[in-house]
């Protein structure tokens, strides 16, 4: 007997005008939770992530890009030309039957399109609209543009991160994007919870900059209280030692080790066969270890240099010491823990076949929460959504197509049967 | 607080360090009643730098930030203490807890047992590797979660010196991401519980999986094209990176072709802009090390502030590499009232980051200072939850 599980966002529809990474990562979470996410796409300006490698088997194509296919899992794709009056009208109709409207354009872009909150409210008074612009909707720099990588220097993370004695550093990810996306998903959930109780919709002004500043609180508050900014310290910790990424046996192989308690330290020293260090009174407190940081790092480095990362991690984890090798993308895909937990998805996709993606990072014991399916092909659900959600018939869709509501006149009928 | 989204929702925060504290911070500022349940020694968060010291008192500034709008109760080891815990659990909607799984079990928080005793409770665990799986009991701190999630290995990206190791981002970014994911999961579980007629459940958040789900296009380089990533690899797009201007470091990138064209024009259409090696954004990424010095030479007569304003007026994505002082004095952030002042009888009035987003109808609750350890231990449970 199959027991039907509750879908947290059952019946919630999202008109998703977002693109690139921040917005799509937000609506992906809502899709995992069961919302119907209708992504409005432009043929004139196809989503950046459909136009970036990696492409499946290195063959370029809008439906073959891994970046797009990761963050669009379980969504529907509708193409609309928002600069065409009829296309805009269809967009408004989708909004009318939606609960949430999301965008991550620069401020005022939605207003210029005629899809600003004041316009949306006229179409659907209890709509929840969220804009995730770089700087927010107000303030002197509201029209400035920002992408996720720009947020890293903007929030001060670049000035705090880096190798000792070298300049400010990037951190390998366009970190502002997913962070804005997760905060946006949370904000939308809060607004939905509020609306369910009061019937009241609202507008959420998310500045990607502000959503991330709290994450450097340790740096910021050091300035507020002590008028000092921490020096760039590589992989060290502000308080604990030894901590670092140490070279291992092999070509460019490394292991991350962190001692954050007396117990960690004692176990590490024993695992390294350094009873002499275990016995040292001056290393028994975190302050003592921090004061001897260089010496302890050298001891760890000497020990790891003769071992593989796998060897080090197995030995240390068995002793209760935090350690892991810094995984590559391949390491992530093959990681036994992630695989055992079903962290990955593999859906059949008509153009790229079965490809491994990362699914929902949470497991609900009793609710139906998961990646819902593969990413959509460009414009795949245009006719379907117009029929099922808006109740249009085939002849009306054909008229819209001829009028250029979707893109170049006739695009839909050329690309999709039933259009 | 009537009018806030989560008014009437009761959250018990039994976490350690950042993840649970950040999850419950987000909920507290949107109206939930949050009781922070601490072991007698206090949340180790209280021992995290930076510290503020005044008049012989010392506190963690990070804790002063994360625990605003919460109440602190110390869990006593005696039977009386357990009954306080029992009544808190009976009345709570959500328990949020973070840390190593073994540590959580050792502290007596087993989700299965809790749900057997309190069937309407939502238990959100935020653990490094998740609650199940062969490595669920492995130990981790921030650096280790970054390694296991696949972030550390690709950072800083496009590194020019292979002798340098993978680089951790400053602070406790994995913990913070675990926290915001935990907050999402907690609210989703509230929606589902309502549909189930009040029956609670265990929600299991794996920080490793949260980080793995945030790897941009890097993960798919393996599953789509068989390319293994490293910190030494090239960038996705060029130009992209930090250059040195007249008065400091400055970041610039051109994501789209029209942005690049405007940059070239801004630089006075130099000959090199037409070179084949800079022909499109992927070629520019491959040759970014050659490109950035040329851009730097074309801009380094400008101060960061001038470059920022002039390039942004051309709609080119860029920013000075902000220091903490620059953030705190930003005219834009000030005009948006982003920072908030929080009064504390011991540590004085201080500036803290405020709301991560602005909701038009349900604004972020005004901050009240973080509680001292056990400050509300003697309060009745109804007072703790704010029921009068």
Image (cartoon, coloured by chain):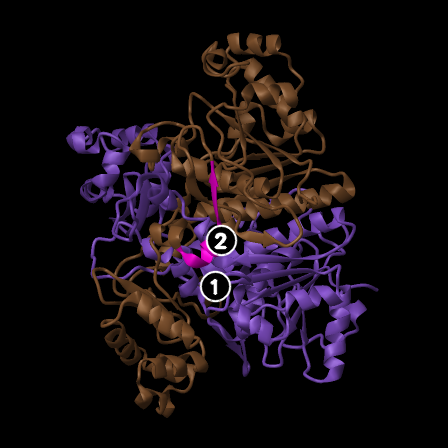
Chain colours: A brown, B purple
- Quadrant housing the C terminus of chain B: bottom right
Q: Residue at x 69, y 35 (%)?
A: A11
Question: Dot 1, how many residues are within 10 Å of its Cα: few (below 14), some (14-19), or many (20+)?
Answer: some
Nearer to the camera, B107 or B349? B107
Give the side of residue A193 with respect to residue B46, left or right.
right
Where does the image place residue A384, in percent across and percent down from the top left? 59, 21
Asked if the stretch drawn in magenta spans residue A212, the answer is no
Secondary structure of the residue carrying tag 2 is helix
Q: Which residue is mark 2?
A: B210
Q: Which residue is mark 1?
A: B134
Question: Dot 2, how many residues are within 10 Å of its Cα: few (below 14), some (14-19), or many (20+)?
Answer: many
Specify the segment rendered in magenta.
Answer: A335-347
Q: Nearer the viewer, mark 1 or mark 2?
A: 1
Q: Residue at x 45, y 68 (%)?
A: B140
Eyeballing the image, is A60 above or below A67?
above
Disc 1 chain ID? B
Where does the image place residue B182, in percent across and percent down from the top left? 58, 56
Asked if the stretch drawn in magenta spans residue A339, the answer is yes
Whether residue A346 is visible: yes
Give the side of residue B58 with respect to residue A201, left or right.
left
Do tag 1 and tag 2 residues touch (Cβ < 8 Å)? no
Where does the image place residue A319, in percent across and percent down from the top left? 41, 77
Disc 2 chain ID? B
Mark found first going from the N terminus, 1 or 2: 1
Whether residue B339 is visible: no
């Amino acid at each position: 007997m199959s027991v039907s599980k509750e879908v947290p966002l059952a019946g919630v529809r999202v008109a998703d005008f977002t693109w690139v990474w921040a917005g799509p990562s937000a609506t992906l979470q809502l899709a995992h939770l069961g919302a119907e996410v209708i992504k409005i796409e432009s043929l004139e300006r196809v989503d950046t992530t459909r136009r970036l490698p990696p492409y499946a088997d290195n063959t370029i194509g809008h439906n073959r890009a891994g970046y797009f296919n990761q963050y669009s899992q379980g969504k529907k794709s509708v193409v609309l030309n928002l600069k065409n009056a009829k296309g805009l009208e269809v967009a408004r109709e989708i909004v009318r039957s939606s609960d949430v409207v999301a965008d991550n354009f620069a401020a005022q872009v939605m207003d210029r399109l005629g899809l600003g909150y004041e316009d949306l409210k006229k179409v659907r008074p209890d709509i929840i609209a969220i804009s995730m612009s770089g700087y927010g909707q107000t303030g002197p720099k509201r029209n400035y543009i920002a992408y996720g990588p720009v947020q890293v220097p903007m929030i001060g993370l670049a000035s705090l991160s880096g190798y000792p004695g070298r300049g400010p550093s990037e951190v390998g990810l366009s970190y502002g994007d997913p962070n804005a996306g997760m905060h946006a998903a949370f904000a939308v959930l809060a607004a939905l919870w509020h609306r369910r109780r009061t019937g009241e919709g609202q507008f959420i002004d998310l500045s990607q900059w502000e959503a991330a500043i709290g994450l450097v609180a340790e740096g910021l508050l050091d300035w507020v209280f002590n008028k000092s900014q921490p020096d760039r310290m590589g992989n060290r910790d502000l308080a604990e030692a030894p901590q670092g990424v140490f070279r291992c046996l092999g070509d460019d192989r490394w292991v991350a080790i962190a001692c954050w308690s007396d117990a960690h330290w004692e176990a590490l020293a024993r695992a390294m066969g350094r009873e002499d260090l275990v016995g040292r009174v001056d290393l028994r407190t975190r302050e003592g270890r921090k004061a001897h940081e260089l010496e302890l790092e050298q001891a760890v480095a000497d020990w790891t240099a003769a071992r593989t990362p796998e060897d080090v991690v197995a030995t240390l984890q068995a002793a209760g010491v935090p350690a892991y090798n810094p995984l590559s993308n391949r390491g992530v895909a093959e990681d036994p823990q992630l695989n055992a937990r079903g962290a990955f998805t593999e859906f059949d996709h008509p153009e790229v076949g079965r490809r491994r993606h990362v699914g929902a990072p949470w497991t609900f014991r009793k609710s139906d929460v998961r990646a819902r399916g593969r990413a959509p092909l460009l414009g795949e659900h245009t006719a379907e959504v117009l029929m099922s959600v808006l109740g249009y018939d085939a002849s009306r869709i054909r008229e819209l197509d001829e009028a250029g509501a979707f893109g170049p006149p006739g695009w839909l009928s050329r690309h999709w049967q039933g259009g | 607080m009537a009018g806030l989204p989560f008014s009437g929702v009761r959250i018990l925060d039994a976490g350690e360090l950042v993840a649970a504290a950040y999850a419950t911070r987000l909920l507290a500022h949107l109206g939930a009643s949050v009781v922070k349940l601490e072991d007698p020694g206090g949340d180790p968060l209280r021992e995290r730098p930076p510290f503020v010291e005044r008049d012989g008192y010392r506190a963690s500034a990070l804790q002063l930030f994360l625990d605003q709008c919460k109440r602190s109760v110390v869990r006593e080891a005696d039977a009386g203490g357990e009954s306080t815990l029992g009544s808190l659990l009976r009345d709570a909607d959500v328990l949020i807890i973070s840390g190593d799984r073994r540590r959580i079990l050792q502290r007596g928080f087993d989700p299965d047992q809790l749900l057997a005793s309190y069937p309407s409770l939502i238990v959100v665990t935020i653990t490094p590797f998740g609650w199940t799986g062969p490595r669920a009991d492995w130990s981790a701190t921030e650096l280790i979660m970054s390694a296991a999630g696949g972030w550390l290995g690709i950072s800083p990206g496009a590194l020019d010196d292979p002798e340098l190791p993978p680089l951790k981002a400053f602070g406790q970014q994995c913990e913070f991401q675990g926290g915001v994911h935990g907050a999402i999961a907690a609210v989703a579980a509230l929606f589902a519980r309502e549909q189930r007629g009040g029956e609670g459940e265990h929600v299991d958040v794996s920080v490793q999986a949260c980080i793995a789900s945030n790897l941009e296009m890097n993960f798919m380089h393996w599953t789509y094209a068989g390319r293994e990533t490293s910190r030494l690899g090239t960038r996705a797009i060029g130009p992209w990176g930090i250059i040195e201007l007249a008065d400091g470091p400055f970041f610039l990138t051109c994501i789209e072709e029209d942005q690049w064209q405007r940059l070239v024009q801004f630089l006075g259409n130099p000959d090199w802009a037409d070179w084949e090696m800079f022909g499109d954004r992927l070629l520019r990424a491959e040759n970014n090390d050659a490109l950035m010095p040329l851009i730097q030479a074309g801009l380094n007569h400008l101060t960061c502030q001038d470059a920022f304003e002039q390039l942004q007026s051309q709609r080119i994505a860029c920013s000075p590499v902000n220091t903490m002082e620059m953030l705190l004095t930003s005219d834009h952030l000030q005009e948006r009232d982003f920072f908030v002042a929080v009064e504390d009888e011991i540590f004085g009035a201080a500036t803290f980051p405020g709301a991560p987003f602005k909701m038009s109808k349900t604004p972020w609750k005004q901050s009240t200072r973080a509680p001292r350890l056990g400050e509300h231990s003697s309060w009745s449970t109804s007072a703790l939850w704010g029921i009068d």
